[in-house]
Amino acid sequence: MSETKTSQVREAVRGAWQKILGDTVARVELASAAVGRVQERALERNRSAVEEMAKLSLASINYLGQLQADWLKLSLEATRKTAELLTPQRASLAAAPPDPQARG
Protein backbone atom coordinates (compact mmCIF):
# COMPACT_ATOMS: atom_id res chain seq x y z
CA MET A 1 0.00 0.00 0.00
CA SER A 2 2.87 2.32 0.65
CA GLU A 3 3.99 1.75 -2.92
CA THR A 4 0.57 2.77 -4.20
CA LYS A 5 0.53 5.86 -2.05
CA THR A 6 3.98 6.86 -3.27
CA SER A 7 2.95 6.22 -6.82
CA GLN A 8 -0.15 8.38 -6.38
CA VAL A 9 1.91 11.19 -4.85
CA ARG A 10 4.38 10.95 -7.72
CA GLU A 11 1.60 11.14 -10.27
CA ALA A 12 0.03 14.10 -8.46
CA VAL A 13 3.37 15.94 -8.34
CA ARG A 14 4.07 15.07 -11.98
CA GLY A 15 0.62 16.32 -12.99
CA ALA A 16 1.04 19.55 -11.00
CA TRP A 17 4.53 20.04 -12.43
CA GLN A 18 3.28 19.48 -15.98
CA LYS A 19 0.47 21.98 -15.38
CA ILE A 20 2.94 24.56 -14.03
CA LEU A 21 5.25 24.04 -17.01
CA GLY A 22 2.34 24.15 -19.46
CA ASP A 23 1.06 27.38 -17.93
CA THR A 24 4.57 28.85 -18.01
CA VAL A 25 5.03 27.93 -21.67
CA ALA A 26 1.63 29.43 -22.51
CA ARG A 27 2.55 32.68 -20.72
CA VAL A 28 5.91 32.83 -22.49
CA GLU A 29 4.13 32.31 -25.82
CA LEU A 30 1.68 35.14 -25.01
CA ALA A 31 4.53 37.41 -23.93
CA SER A 32 6.50 36.56 -27.07
CA ALA A 33 3.49 37.36 -29.24
CA ALA A 34 3.03 40.68 -27.44
CA VAL A 35 6.72 41.52 -27.86
CA GLY A 36 6.47 40.59 -31.54
CA ARG A 37 3.55 42.98 -32.03
CA VAL A 38 5.40 45.79 -30.25
CA GLN A 39 8.52 45.14 -32.33
CA GLU A 40 6.53 45.16 -35.55
CA ARG A 41 4.93 48.51 -34.63
CA ALA A 42 8.37 49.89 -33.79
CA LEU A 43 9.76 48.67 -37.10
CA GLU A 44 6.87 50.25 -38.96
CA ARG A 45 7.45 53.57 -37.19
CA ASN A 46 11.15 53.33 -38.01
CA ARG A 47 10.36 52.64 -41.66
CA SER A 48 8.03 55.62 -41.75
CA ALA A 49 10.62 57.84 -40.10
CA VAL A 50 13.27 56.78 -42.62
CA GLU A 51 10.90 57.43 -45.51
CA GLU A 52 10.06 60.86 -44.10
CA MET A 53 13.75 61.66 -43.59
CA ALA A 54 14.42 60.64 -47.20
CA LYS A 55 11.63 62.94 -48.43
CA LEU A 56 12.93 65.82 -46.31
CA SER A 57 16.50 65.20 -47.46
CA LEU A 58 15.44 65.20 -51.10
CA ALA A 59 13.43 68.39 -50.60
CA SER A 60 16.44 70.00 -48.89
CA ILE A 61 18.74 69.00 -51.74
CA ASN A 62 16.29 70.36 -54.31
CA TYR A 63 15.95 73.61 -52.35
CA LEU A 64 19.72 73.92 -52.08
CA GLY A 65 20.02 73.45 -55.84
CA GLN A 66 17.43 76.16 -56.43
CA LEU A 67 19.21 78.52 -54.01
CA GLN A 68 22.52 77.92 -55.78
CA ALA A 69 20.97 78.58 -59.18
CA ASP A 70 19.29 81.76 -57.92
CA TRP A 71 22.48 82.95 -56.24
CA LEU A 72 24.46 82.39 -59.44
CA LYS A 73 21.85 84.28 -61.47
CA LEU A 74 21.85 87.20 -59.02
CA SER A 75 25.65 87.25 -58.86
CA LEU A 76 25.94 87.41 -62.63
CA GLU A 77 23.31 90.11 -62.79
CA ALA A 78 25.11 92.15 -60.11
CA THR A 79 28.43 91.69 -61.93
CA ARG A 80 26.91 92.92 -65.20
CA LYS A 81 25.34 95.95 -63.53
CA THR A 82 28.60 96.78 -61.77
CA ALA A 83 30.48 96.49 -65.05
CA GLU A 84 27.93 98.81 -66.72
CA LEU A 85 28.31 101.38 -63.93
CA LEU A 86 32.10 101.27 -64.12
CA THR A 87 32.24 101.49 -67.92
CA PRO A 88 32.14 105.11 -69.18
CA GLN A 89 29.57 105.76 -71.86
CA ARG A 90 30.77 107.24 -75.19
CA ALA A 91 28.06 109.88 -75.19
CA SER A 92 28.98 111.12 -71.75
CA LEU A 93 32.67 111.32 -72.70
CA ALA A 94 31.95 113.35 -75.82
CA ALA A 95 29.48 115.67 -74.11
CA ALA A 96 31.57 116.43 -71.06
CA PRO A 97 33.46 119.74 -71.27
CA PRO A 98 37.15 119.60 -70.48
CA ASP A 99 38.01 120.23 -66.86
CA PRO A 100 40.04 123.45 -66.64
CA GLN A 101 41.65 122.45 -63.38
CA ALA A 102 42.83 119.17 -64.80
CA ARG A 103 45.53 120.97 -66.89
CA GLY A 104 47.08 122.34 -63.78
Image (cartoon, helix red, strand yellow):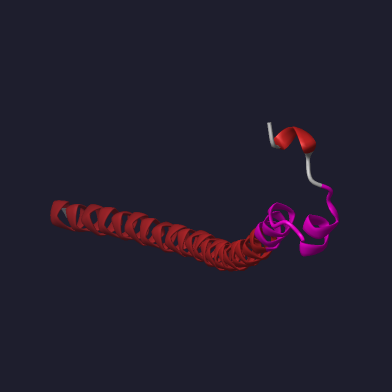
Depth check, front residue: 61 or 101: 101
Q: Residue at x 65, y 61 (%)?
A: 67
Q: Quadrant of residue 65?
A: bottom right
Q: Position of residue 26 (x, y in %)?
A: 42, 62
Q: What is the span of residues highlighted in magenta in the rendered image?
A: 77-97
Q: Position of residue 77 (x, y in %)?
A: 70, 62
Q: Is residue 87 left or right of residue 100?
A: left
Q: Height in image: 100 above or below 88? A: above
Going by the picture, which residue comes out furthest to the left? 3
The number of callouts visible is: 0
Depth check, front residue: 31 or 103: 103
Q: Any magenta on residue 86?
A: yes
Q: Is residue 85 left or right of residue 10?
A: right
Q: Residue at x 19, y 58 (%)?
A: 7
Q: Quadrant of residue 72?
A: bottom right
Depth check, front residue: 88 or 69: 88
Q: Is residue 1 left or right of residue 14?
A: left
Q: Position of residue 49 (x, y in %)?
A: 57, 61
Q: Position of residue 74 (x, y in %)?
A: 69, 60
Q: Height in image: 68 above or below 104? A: below
Q: Residue at x 58, y 68 (%)?
A: 58
* Quadrant position of the C terminus in the picture: top right
Depth check, front residue: 9 or 82: 82
Q: Height in image: 18 above or below 102? A: below
Main SS class of the magenta portion in the image: helix
Q: Is residue 16 left or right of residue 38?
A: left
Q: Any magenta on residue 90?
A: yes
